[in-house]
Amino acid sequence: MSTPAGRRLPRRSPRRRAALGAGLAGLLATGLLTGAAPAPASAAPAAAAAPDIPLANLKAHLSQFQSIAQANGGNRAHGRPGYRASVDYVKGKLDAAGYTTTVQQFTSNGSTGYNLIADWPGGDTDSVVMAGAHLDSVGSGAGINDNASGSAGVLEVALAVARSGYRPDKHLRFAWWGAEELGLVGSRHYVGGLSSSERSKIDGYLNFDMIASPNAGYFVYDDDPRIERVFKDWFAARGVPTEIETEGDGRSDHAPFKAAGIPVGGLFTGAGRTKTTAQAQKWGGTAGVAFDRCYHSSCDNTSNVNDTALDRNGDAAAHAVWTLSSGATAPPPGGVFENTADVPIPDGGPAVESPITVTGVPGNAPGALRVGVDIRHTYRGDLVIDLVAPDGSAHRLKGSGTDSGDDVVATYTVDASSEAAGGTWRLRVQDVHRYDSGHLDDWSLTF
Ligand code: TRP
Ligand code: ZN
Ligand code: CA
């Protein structure tokens, strides 16, 4: 079953993908995720302001997570009953608020893990704004700052969307990840299950991991500049200085999204690292002490929370979700084009090509043309990949090398502003070394 080569994806009938969890695939197949096309940029009203996220609501969720841990052997860790109870708690709130929820299962370390995904019906499903947090704790405690804080923040933003009847131009999706503490297992599983076109439709992913550290700093991820700017502006307007997050880049669930070429951002109040004198001067708190001295310890309970940080970060999260999902910035005019026909790539052989014919997009291609590539292969270092424009000019996406990873599941950004958008584009793939081989599964162009 495949889309005819180069056919423009119809907005109202997204294709079912076998790679997705059964629940989400079913959701896509029934078209629940589709919504109205965005208003033209010129007609887009100014973005509605995000509501205040009540600190009391955030703290009530933290108390519930603490009780869940207490009733389940003291933790909410992957594979333990306190994790499943945490999923049920969040899911219950979202279902009651009108969300379409999906529990995605995976296996890690011999135990079943769960991601919880919640879609807010409506908005342009070709432009998805995601926000997420890991819901698991370590085994040694209740995990209230790490990461009931982020989980509560994302939950309250989602509930605020429902309470306010917000109808974003873009599609909103919220996620609570399992088994982050075992190495980003849940978020990797989710991203790995998306097709290239599904990945290319995610405008941005916002991550919230540890947003209420008792000796808090205000750290903004230094990734996608637009997302970073939205957060920094919010704090600057309130006179709260921020710093760039440097305590282990890639140590949370934004990393798989970033690796797949999806713009990411997020907030963080610090983990085991020590607050400096300069940081204590600008933020308060105690110099020479860790941002969270209960990090991954049994004392990460409801006492291990900085209310001011939780309050600010909850409000900043809402602000970012509102700002990034409104159509105040122009949506891409052209949409997504995809070719899902499998093409075998001969081992150590000649290049193969897969076409996509683009129609209905006037003028030149964008300066940031997104090329989603999904190649299944046993040694990706063998592969040379080019995007060939309608006039025959080639843009190198990837050269060969000694990269022993397997598949190429990536979104490349190409400056194609010198190319006419309309016409037949080709993905050219060559396997230049003998022994390992594979096939092109799917690729897409987002204009
Ligand atoms: N993700 C880590 C944990 O859950 C905490 C962490 C360390 C972190 N460095 C980070 C989170 C940087 C976000 C950004 O244990
Ligand atoms: Zn942790
Ligand atoms: Ca080979």
Image (tube, rainbow, N blue to C red):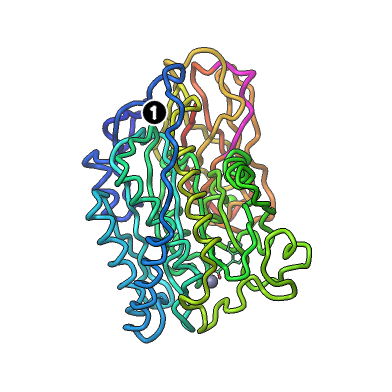
Q: Is residue 418 magenta?
A: yes
Residue 383 seen in the current view: no
Image position, residue 53 (x, y; %): 42, 52
User: Magenta region's main secondary structure?
Assistant: loop
Magenta-highlighted residues: 412-420
Q: Quick one: label 1, few (<14), some, or many (20+) residues within 10 Å?
A: some
Tell which residue pokes out farthest to the bottom in this image.
73
Image position, residue 41 (x, y; %): 46, 20
Nearest to the observer: residue 77 or residue 107: 77
Label 1, ligand 3: CB separation under 8 Å: no
Please state, as top left, top right, bottom left or bottom right, where the N terminus lies in the image: top left
Nearest to the observer: residue 79 or residue 173: 173
Q: Is residue 215 magenta?
A: no
Image position, residue 239 (x, y; %): 65, 48
Q: Quadrant of residue 114 in the image? A: bottom left
Q: Report the residue at 53% width, 35% height from top.
A: 371
- Residue topped by disc 1: 5
Q: Secondary structure at mark 1?
A: loop
Residue 333 lies left or right of residue 250; in this view the side is left
Q: Report the residue at 26% width, 54% height from top.
A: 23
Badge count: 1
